[in-house]
Image (tube, rainbow, N blue to C red):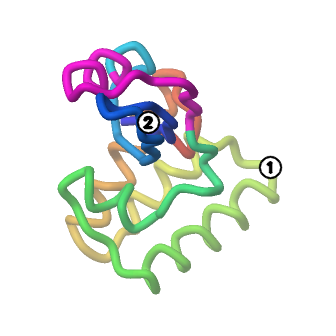
Amino acid sequence: MPEFEYVGIDKSGKKTTGKFDAPSEGDLRVYLRSKGIRPMRIKKINAFKQDLGKIFRSSGRTMSLETLVSVTRQLHALITSGIPLVQGLEFLAEQAATTNIKTIITVMKEKVSQGSYLWEA
């Protein structure tokens, strides 16, 4: 789910800022209004500013930082050697050491093959 930053005005007229996960900007606007906040500015947070740990925890699965680094390096090597992204993810899923890692990579592969960006997957 995308993460948004917002700036708004609450019922007392004070400026309010924050971050919130919402399916869309419209859903966030509805939520903020229900809390008595009038949104002034909403911006989707760039993937480079998102917390990778939060992304993995929100999927209900966990992956250690060392494993994430290892998978990322392996995927980089596969892509730079000319292997397509989806096929590279497929290779990594087949070679995963644990079922948890295999599940995470398989879900990523499915989302990318359905048209999502890698960072969204």
Residue at 46% x, 46% y is 17
Q: Which residues are magenta?
A: 28-44
Task: Looking at the picture, tell me which residue is in the foreground, 85 or 45.
Answer: 45
Identify whether 108 is placed above or below 100: above
**Residue matched to label 2:** 2
Query: Quadrant of the image for the C terminus?
Result: top left
Q: Is residue 14 visible?
A: yes
Q: Residue 57, labelled with which disc?
A: none
Q: Secondary structure at mark 1?
A: loop
In primary-sequence order, the first of circles 2 and 1 is: 2
Asked whether, in this view, residue 36 is left or right of residue 50, the answer is: left
Q: Position of residue 106 (x, y in %)?
A: 35, 47
**Residue matched to label 1:** 82
Identify whether 74 is placed above or below 118: below
Task: Looking at the picture, tell me which residue is in the foreground, 11 or 83.
Answer: 11
Task: Looking at the picture, tell me which residue is in the foreground, 74 or 18.
Answer: 18
Quarter holding residue 26: top left
Q: Position of residue 89 (x, y in %)?
A: 51, 51
- Can you tell which of label 2 and label 1 is closer to the viewer? 2
Identify whether 113 is placed above or below 33: below
Residue at 56% x, 34% y is 44
Reply yes or no: does residue 86 show up in magenta.
no
Name the amino acid type tagged 2.
Pro
Q: Tally the numbered discs.
A: 2
Q: Position of residue 78 (x, y in %)?
A: 69, 60
